[in-house]
Amino acid sequence: MIVRLLLLIVLPILAWYAAKSISQKYSLTARQNRYLFLTTAVLLLIVLLIMLGRLPVQWLLAPLGAAGAFLLRMLPAALRLLPFWQMLGSRISTASASASQNQTSTLRTEYLEMELVHGSGELDGNILRGEFIGRRLSSLGKEELLRLHAECRVDADSCQVLEAYLDRGHSGWRSNAQHNEESAGGGANTEITMNRQLALEILGLSEGASREDIIRAHRKLMQKFHPDRGGSDYFSKKINAAKDLLLNG
């Protein structure tokens, strides 16, 4: 009797720790965590009912035996179809990986339309105003980028976006920019007002995205653009602001 009582106390604790350990090890999403804990709870309930004598073991063994017999009968057919399923799974995995690599986020400012490629972490954009209108940032040389930077000083967001791009691809640009001190204090004080459409574009999502989609997209972008990983404070702030608005707005 004492042993049974101890098991009734210990088993739920062990099951909870096991589920928590699996969740942390594999970084499960909120939805996956719900499924994991629900499955753990159901299995625990079955074990406890068997221990208390409320659920005959035969009740559990009968369907398991029937399922085993069915699987043994279907095994030859399953083995014949195995190459087909492997090929199908490989194609689905390849297509999914390709879609993830090509997913992009967009951030528009007065002078620039920036694109952030999730898979590679590549940052590039189109120039919307000024001397280099219609060109890609990647097509400009260092001196041309510095001239564009001088033009962008009138818009705080454009200036900060371009500085983040220069920091990633032209590490020594600040020492060669004579107007650096002016750009630090001479820009506009206003920044882009975050709204739902802009937040979706920044995270690379479409309307109707779930909470799990938002968290997943935010985590993926922060892995690429966090300041500690060579990103910029500006982009990390925008990515965080987009997530906060979509989750709490």
Image: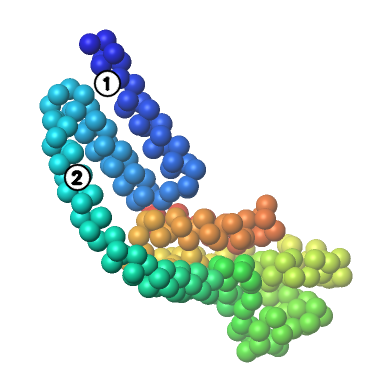
Q: Is residue 101 above or below residue 238?
A: below
| Tag 2 near tag 1, CB within 8 Å | no
The residue tagged 1 is 8
Q: Residue furthest top?
A: 2
Secondary structure, mark 1, is helix
User: What colour scheme does the image use?
Assistant: rainbow
The N terminus, quarter of image? top left
Q: Is residue 49 above or below residue 113?
A: above
The C terminus, quarter of image? bottom left
Image quadrant in which you'd find residue 64 = top left
Residue 92 makes an appearance in the image: no
Q: Residues within 10 Å of mark 1 (few under 14, many from 20)?
A: some
Pick whichever, 167 or 111, lies toward us: 167
Q: Is residue 82 left or right of residue 59?
A: right
Q: Is residue 78 left or right of residue 129?
A: left
- Report x, y in % for residue 105: 52, 71
- Report x, y in % for residue 194: 48, 64
Secondary structure, mark 2, is helix
Residue 98 makes an appearance in the image: yes
Alpha carbon of mark 2 to alpha carbon of mark 1: how far?
Answer: 27 Å
Residue placed at 74% from the left, 66% from the top?
A: 167
Image quadrant in which you'd find residue 136 = bottom right
The residue tagged 2 is 65
Pick whichever, 55 or 11, lies toward us: 55
Residue placed at 57% from the left, 74% from the top?
A: 115
- Report x, y in % for residue 52: 17, 22
Pick whichever, 234 or 98, lies toward us: 98
Image quadrant in which you'd find residue 180 = bottom right
Residue placed at 73% from the left, 62% from the top?
A: 185
User: Hey, what amino acid is under mark 2?
Assistant: Gly
User: Hey, what amino acid is under mark 1?
Assistant: Leu
